[in-house]
Structures are given as structure tokens and as C-alpha cells.
Image (cartoon, grey):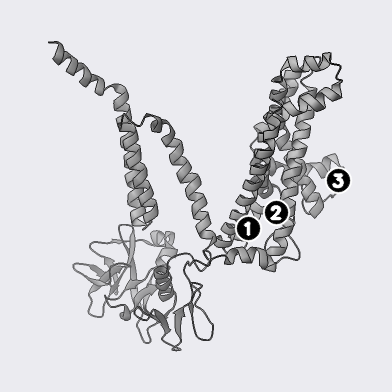
Amino acid sequence: MSAPLSRGSTLVKGWSPGFLVKLVLMAIVDALGVFAILAAWGEESYGILAAMLALLVVANWAYFSKRALPLKYILPGLAFLLVFQVYVVAYTGYVAFTNYGDGHNSTKEHAVAALLAQNERRVEGSPASPLTVVAQGDALGFAIVSDDGDVLAGTAEQPLEEVDDAGVDGDRATDVPGYEVLDRASVLERQQEVTALRVPVSDDPNDGSLRTQDARTGYVFLPSLVYDEAADTLTDTVSGTVYTPDDNGLFEAEDGTTLPVGWRVVVGFENFLTAFGDDRYATPFLKILIWTFAFAVLSVGTTFLLGLFLAITFNDVRLRGRKIYRTLLILPYAIPGFLAALLWSGLLNKSFGFINQVLLGGAAIPWLTDPWLAKLAVLGVNLWLGFPYMFLICTGALQSLPGDVLEAAKIDGAGRWRTWRSITLPLLLVSTAPLLISSFAFNFNNFTLIYMLTNGGPRFTDASVPLGHTDILISMVYSISGIDGSAPKNYGLASALSIVIFLIVATISALAFRRTRSLEEIA
């Protein structure tokens, strides 16, 4: 009887509540993973597909294998590291060597399709057809009545074809089986989609496409460019000009003219050469680089010194109400940084700010519009935002100093200054130096403060790109990328500058960490 009981107990143990919870969680993870794989397959992102598949296989093996116990604990962090750090850095590096940006957003096939769609002309003598906007699921379509009284309907993927048993009112289709006839309100909601829609007249692309501008009348358009897949050329049917692909991802004619839509290609170090060799970017880049270093160093220095001074002051046991003072001092740290910077932007407003109007009696000091005052304002606001953090870490470091060492120095006759310089400060730097390095890296990329307080302004008057005196490298990258619409999108150049920032911060951090090792000998 003992053997069956043993097998039964083992079976029950194998399906314990913990195992069931793990099974459910892994089922959810697998479902999300399969969804991501299918989405990557649909977008033809085969690199992401392979990575997701590998992560799913490793995850299932790790959590259902008894030999992968350590991996169970490190796999989530490792997966997030690969997805949000390694992949991002690798993709940024790839984009830095391409011409990705306005006019070069996709593949060559997409560029050809866009050029053919954008370069169209109305078929000469083609009649104006009363048109009805219809929908088949999420896909929009058009329905027209032919000269024979038949109703023809189609979508962008399905050419016009006859629909049986359709309803007609005069010369306009009112009921189209298999389609939903959209009312005027629905058409207006999707107006941009309607005007951009092209419904092929037949399976032959040379017959043209049906288009409309007012959602009521349709015209047949033919492309004025013809693509020869064998020769890989585009020919203008009106002028006869032949365009061939060049090394820059554009179709170019013999006279040097190019078509406006291109595709992504690898351009080597061209973006880096542009950043350092093109006067439009090189001149402001040097100014911004110097200011970025000054901003990061001064921010760390001022916040650390003020935080250290306050920590020393409120670490004195003779001071009453220390807990209340400490609580008040960390209040700026409790306010979200972006909100605090936005508030200071209003306080420092030249015409209506509280500082000028109330504290300075109506003065019109251009805190945010004068180059030097704007930099001073940025440093001052960052000091207000950053000193509570330094105050906290310095207070903790001072309270953790060994009392016997300080007492021994006092017995040996060391004065307060000597004890501070030779014992307290070195021991303090042992614990705070890594945090100072991380603070430098943070301020080197403190995009939120710059964007919310000054938006990089005031602008350079001698630069043709939208950059300003308080821009740091990371905000320069944001402006050059064109995401905010202030300049044409240039993701390749922005990625190249991001790589430069990464190398600068990594090099300085590595050197600083090596330097701090000498402090460990004191501890």
C-alpha cells in the first residue's frame, strides 16, 4: 500500500498551487509573445520575430526545467536589458549609419509605390462619375453607377467589380450588398482617408484608379510615372525623363534632378562627417558641447556643495528642530521635475513672472531671453531641484562615518579643519563619488529641465538650424531629429549625435570610476 500512496503524493505535489500559478503566468507570457511574433511577422520585422521567439523558448525552458534555477531569477532582468537597452543601442547605431529621415522613411518598394501614387494625372476626357463612399469592415471603398446602370464597387485592394441587387437612386448608388454605405457625418470623420483613397478601375494598373476630392464625384487618374521593374527605372510619361536609383536612396535623372521620395540606405560615416564638418551643425555643436560640459559640471558641483553644507549644518546635535528642517528641505525633491521646471518658467517670465513683478518691483529682467541670464536661470533652477538629493546622500554618509576614527583623530590633536580635510571628506567621497558620477551623467542628458524651462532658447542668431544658447547635446539631438516639427526629420544625424553623447558619457564615467578606486584604500 505504501507504493501507491507515494506515487499519489508525488502527483499531488507536482500540481501544487505554486505550479498552477506558474503555469497560468507562463501561459499569459506565451500568449503575449505569440501576439508580438505575429505582429512582427505582419510588419516583416524578422529580427524582432527571431528575438521574441528565442526569448519565449528560453523562458519556457528556464521556468519548467529543474536545472535552470539561477536563470529563473535573472531572466526577467536579462530580457528587459536586451529589449530596452541592448536592442535600443544597437538600433540607434544602425540608424546612425543610414539616411533615415524625411524622404527616406521606408524601403525602396514603398518609395516606388508612393511615387506612383503621388504622381498622377486625370485621364483626358474621362467623365465625372457620381460616387458613393462605402466601407467593407475597416476598409473604405467607392461605389459608382456605370453607363449601363450597373453598380460597381471596390476598395484599395479590390478593383471595381459589379455588385448584384444594388439599390440606385437616380445616378447614385444607395444600397450596395456586401458594403456599408457611409452617411455624410461618417465621411466627414474620415475625410483624409477618403481623399487619399485610390480604387483600381480593373486588375490592370494601366487602366488607372478612381479618386475623389469631395466624396461625391469620382475621376479616373493614371500615374504619370511608370516603373520598369526589369530595368529598375521610373519614366515620366509626359516628359520622357528616365530616373534611375543612386547611392543616396533616390531616383535621379541624368541632369541631376531627383524625385522627392526615397528609401533608407547605408551611408557610412556621412552623418558623423555632417555633424563635425558641416558649418550648419559643426559651429553650434561646438558651442553646445562646451555648454553641456559646463552645465553638467556646475550642476553637480553646486548641488553637492549646497547639499553638503546643509547636511553638515543639520547634522549638528545642538540644533533644535532638525527633523522639521530636513523635511522642509526635501520638498523640492518631492515635486516632479518637469512640473517644477514648468512652474519656474512662469515665475521667470519677463513680463508677467512673479519674480520680476512682485519680488523685483516690476523689473523687466530677461531671465529666459538673454543668453547669459538664461544659462544662469537654468543653473539656478537645477540647483533648487538637485540640492535635496545631495543633502539626503550627504546626510546618510555623514551619519555612517565611524565614530572611533574621528575620536582617534581628536585624541591625536587634529583640529576641526584637519579632521575634515584628511578624514571626513575622503570617507565621505568613498560613498558619494559613484553618486556624483551618476549625477554628472544625468545632468549631461537632463532633457526635461532644458525643454520645460527654456526649450533651448534663446536661439542662435548665426545658425540656420533651430538651436539655442541653453541647448545641451540631448536637446540638440531632439531638435535635429525633427520630432517637434521645428526642422525636417533627420533620424540618421540625430542617432549619430546620440552615439557621440554615449561615447562621451561612457568615457568620462569609466575614467571617473577608475579614479574613485584610489579612495577605497582610505576606507
Q: Earlier in the sequence, mark 2 or mark 1?
A: 2
Residue 244 on image: x %, y %: 45, 80
Q: Are circles 3 and 1 on residues that touch, CB within 8 Å?
A: no
Q: Nearer the viewer, residue 523 or 16?
A: 523
Q: Is residue 117 left or right of residue 379?
A: left
Look at the image and tell me in which quarter the C terminus lies: top right
Sequence-first disc among 3 and 1: 3
x 22%, y 79%: residue: 148
Task: Tell me how far mark 2 sits from mark 3, CA to CA.
Answer: 29 Å
Q: Quadrant of the N terminus?
A: top left
Circle number at residue 295: none
- Give the residue furthest to the bottom: 239
Are dots 2 and 1 in contact, CB under 8 Å? yes
Residue 362 got which mark? 3
Quarter of the image where one finds residue 478: bottom right
Q: CA distance from mark 3 to mark 1?
A: 34 Å
Q: Position of residue 22 (x, y in %)?
A: 32, 29
Where does label 2 land, which residue? Answer: 471
Q: Residues within 10 Å of mark 3 (few under 14, many from 20)?
A: some
Looking at the picture, which amino acid does disc 1 mark? Answer: Ser
Mark in front: 3 vs 1:
1
- For the residues labelled 2 and 1, the Cα–Cα distance comes to 9 Å
Instruction: Using a 10 Å C-alpha cutoff, classify the residue at mark 2 as few (fewer than 14 neighbours), some (14 to 19) or many (20 or more).
Output: many
Categorize mark 1 by other alpha carbons within 10 Å: few (<14), some (14-19), many (20+): many
Q: Considering the numbered disc 1 on the image, is that residue within a helix, a strand or a loop?
A: helix
Could you tell me if residue 88 is visible in this image?
A: yes
Is residue 455 shown above or below 165? above
Circle 3: element type: loop
The residue that mark 1 highlights is 479
Name the amino acid, label 3: Gly
Q: Secondary structure at mark 2?
A: loop
What's the amino acid at mark 2?
Asp
